[in-house]
Each structure stands twice: as C-alpha cells, then as structure tokens.
Amino acid sequence: MTDLADRALPRIARERSASLQFLIRLFREKPLGAAGAVIFILFLFCGVFAGLLAPFGVNEISPINRLRPPSAAFPLGTDFLGRDMLSRLLYGARLSVIIGFCAAGLSIIVSVVIGIVSGYLGGRTDMITQRFVDAWQSFPALVILIVAVAVLGPGMPQIIGVLALLFGIAGSRIIRGAVVSVREHMYVHAAQSIGAGTAWIVWRHILPNVVPLVIVLFTSRVGAVILAEAALSFLGFGVPPPAPTWGGMLSGSARTYMYQAPWLALAPGLCLTIVVYAVNVFGDALRDLLDPRMRGSR
Amino acid sequence: MQAYIIRRLLALIPTLIFASLIVFVTVRLIPGSIIDLMMTQNVSATEKDRATLEAALGLDRPMYIQYFRWAGNVLRGDLGESLWQGTPVAHEIFARLPITLELALLALVVSIAVAIPIGVYSAIRQDTAGDYSTRSISILMLAIPSFWLGTLVMVFPSIWWGWSPQIKFVPFLQDPLQNLNQMFLPAIILGTSLAAITMRVTRTTMLEVLRQDYIRTAWAKGLDERVVVLRHALRNALIPVVTLIGVEIAAVVSVAIVLEQIFVIPGIGLLLIDAVSQRDYPIITGIFLVVGVCVLLINLLIDLSYGLIDPRVRYR
C-alpha cells in the first residue's frame, strides 16, 4: 500500500520534502548558517520591496533637514542634502541585490563553461586555458575593475559584466578540479565506451556532479561581488551618483560631512558587514552540508 | 636548484604572454578614444589631422602589428609617455611602486604576527571557548570592508579625542619614523584583513599535522609542549600558509589601492586612480602590466622559498 503511494507520489512533491528536510538539517546542525540565511532573505526582501518600505524617496532632497541626527522622523538621520539615510540604504540594498545576483549568476556560468571545457577536454586545451587563467589571476581584482571602468565607462551593466568575468574566470579552477575527478569515474568511461557523445556525457554525468559545488560557489560569490562593487563605488568608479550604493554613500562629498554627522559613516558600512557576514556563514554551512569534501577549504 | 629556477622562468613565459595580451586587448577596447581626447584638446584640429595623428601613433595598422610593436617596446623597458606630464611611464611607476610594496610588506608582517600565533593556539585548544571566539572573529573580519574600517579610523578618533592620522607623506629614507607614523594604521587594517584567512589556514593545517604519528612519538618521548608544537608541528604546517600568502598577494594589492586613497599614500594605487580620472591611458596600461608581472614574480619567489622552510622539498 505505502509502496503504491510512494510510486504514485509526484516527483515534485518528493523533491519538496527533500528540500524541507534539507532546511530542517540546516537549522538543526548549523544554527549560525541558518541565521545567516534568514538575514540574507531579509536583505533580499528589503531590496525587492525597497519602494514600499522606504519612508522617503531615494533622491528626495530636503534642505531644511540637512544633517539631522537619527530621530523618529529620520531613524538613521539625514545626509548633507537632507536625504533620508534609511530610505537610501533600502534602495542601496536593491542595487546590491541586483548586482550581487546578476554578477554572481553570470560568473557561475563563466566558471562552469571554462571549467568543463578545460577539465573534460584536457590535453592541450586544458594547458592553454590554465595558463590564461594563471595570467588573469595575477591581476588584482580591483586593478582589472578600475581599468575596465576607465575603458567602458561607469554604469551598472558594465560593472555586472566585468565582475562576472572577474569572478567567473577565478572560480573556473574549482569547477575544473571537480570535473577532472568526475571524468575518471567508471560510469563516465562506460558511457564513453558505448559511444555516447561529449555533449551528452557532460549534460548527463558531469553537470549533475558539479551542481552542489555550483550552489556553494554562487553563495560565496554573492558576498564577494557585493564587497567588490562597494569598494569600486567607494573609489568613485561604481554606479554613478546619485545612485544610492552602499560603497558610494561612504565616499565623495559625504566624507567631508562625517566629522559633524558621524552617523553617515556608520550605517552603510554596518549594512555591508552584516550582509556579507550573513552570506559567508550561510555559504559555509551550505558547503559543509552539500559538499563535505570542501570543508575547511576556502 | 639552478635548473629548477630556469625551468620555472621558462614556464612563466606563456603566462606572461597571456598577461600582456589581456592588458593590450582590454585597453585597446577603446577604439580611437585616445585620439578623441587629443582632438578635444586642440580645437582647430580637423579630420585630416585625425588621420595623421592615427598614423603617428600607429593606430591605423592592424591590431596584431600594434600588439607586437607595443610588446617590443615593453621588452625594451619602454612603457610610453604620460599623456599629461610627458614623463616616461616607467619612471612614474617605479617611483611609486616601492611605496605600495612597503605597505604590503608591513601588512604581511602584521598579518603573520597576528595570524600564526592565534592559528596555532586555536588548533592546540581545538573546540574550546578560545578557539570558537577567535574563529568567529576571523569570519567577521572577512566581512568588514577595509575601506569602512579606514573611514572609521579617520572619523571617530578625530571626533572623540581630536586626533587624526597623519596624511602627509614622508619617504622612508628621509625620516623612517614619520613614514611609519603614516603607514602603521593602513598596514594594521590591511594586515588584519589578511590575517583572517591566514589564521583559518594555519589552524586547519596545524590540526592535520598534530594528528600525525611522529607528533605522537614526540609526545611519547616526553618532549615539552613548546618543542612539540613549535619545532615539530608548526614547521610542517607552514607550507600551505606560505602558498596562501602567494595567492593573497593580488588581493593585498586591491585593498592597498583603497587604503592608499583613504590615507593619502602616494603609491601605485593613487597613481592608478589619478590616471583613470585623467584618462591617462599609457599610465593605466603600464600599471596594469607592471602589477600583474610583479604578482607573478612574487609567486615564483614564494615557490622557490619552499626549500628553505621544508628541506624535504627537492627541486627537480
């Protein structure tokens, strides 16, 4: 009877119960990671619903309310143009979410493509690709970013593209490592010997094996991308003002007013730290649960 | 050993070629914009002048010829001239490079001084309160943006105690104390961000080494804890730590660029930022290339240093 019910159970429902079990494991075994996940979801929520949550408009200037300390009307104070800091932080979360997710997602695609081509094909392709990756990694991330912005001009699409390429090429090493070890498995040799095509083997046998790795890599990339974008905006090469980027809120004209209005210096940095910390501990927990081989690495 | 060094240098060549291609292609993605810039400076210039200018700079030739010409000049040590100052780019860069290297070196000293003792402590007292707290702090340090830390250090001591960091640069050879007075804060900030990762790796490798048989033998012989941990275990745990420092060099430069901006240190980072805001492409290209090559060479030196730490490493 139960056997019959099991068989009748649609695949989706079974998968749902598996992800529910995973969630339970996350909360039971990794409470800190689970807390990170909750903060991360909260941050996503703030980013998506910034328009509804923010008490003021993102660039609503109010000259009489310049540099007001935190109060009931302005919970985090106002900046030198009288813009509400809380509202700008919420809209800043939206920018961070967009850049973080787009750049991390694209970077994973780059990593997987390079990792599989290099790792599965091996031989000369692998040799040449790896020398290229060596060369690419010898450039400090921020130098590549600054040069790219100098060349392409500032703007969100350029920044997302360059961040994706930057982290994608660096992350391809990790995917390649996994592909090289999967390639030598018996079932891959079996598939090759019955004449299966490369594309089929990659799709059916290689890709499913790197999925846990991809999830872990994606989570860790979101944090790294958010930090890199913030550093870039801080230096004045990010999404141009008046866009409310967290990095940008700590730089430029804001810096001259921080001495009389120290709250300007606190909130954006604190938001960055909390979000990146949450993403990192969540990523660590995911890695421990999904891919025990990677434990302790990083 | 000599043969090994020569072989490693030869293996560096393809990587260097790729590095130079990355630099060249990235900067040449801007077709004609150097010309545009020069044209806007000279109002009376005509389209005919544009063609002569392109020819003079060699921009009318095919891309690969441009590359070989550029690479040939680079190999002769000629990185071109600054568009604004007219000074040789190589001159500008090598005047600034030692300053950034000093900052990176100081930060490295700070990070090793902090990370290795804490990592060892964390490993020999695994799963105690001390272990947990140092580990949590290290994860937190990874998340704090160093530009924020730098900003806080600039703003709050000044508000509370009227003290602000020195931002007037004095060369080390002129007055070492004045120089270090400016360098110590950015070095500590850069060093602690580096220490977080170094500490984690030290702890992990120490834990692995401490489980080895020869460590049990050392304990069984009745050796002092200090001797077992420092002489027997730590030396063997150091190789991954040294490798990590090589991997982190590029990241150190990234953070140094940001801190140079905050603490007004005229290193390579400040030069790059100034060059980008002035659109001084020869300087941008030069820094891009020189920094990449420096990182590759430092990594080579680190590979060669393994033999000093671990006599078992034989260079074949």
Image: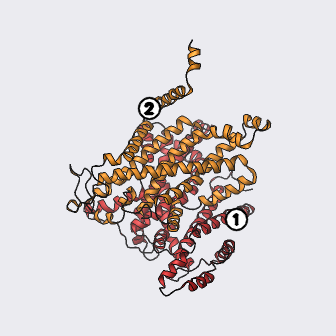
Q: Is residue B139 above or below residue A239?
A: above
Which residue is drawn at the image coordinates 36% and 65% (left, top)?
A: A252
Chain letter for red, please: B
Q: Nearer the viewer, mark 2 or mark 1?
A: 2
Q: Which mark is residue A27?
A: 2
- Chain letter of the residue beneath label 1 in the structure image: B
Percent x, y of residue A81: 27, 62
Which residue is drawn at the image coordinates 31% and 52% (left, top)?
A: A87
Which residue is drawn at the image coordinates 54% and 61% (left, top)?
A: A140
Secondary structure of the residue carrying numbered label 1: helix
Amino acid residing under circle 2: Phe
Percent x, y of residue B248: 54, 56
Q: Is residue B53 left or right of residue A238?
A: right
Residue at the extreme front of the image, as rendered: B47
Image colour for chain A is: orange
- Residue in the foreground of this view, choosing between B269 and A211: A211
Percent x, y of residue A266: 32, 54
Count of numbered marks = 2
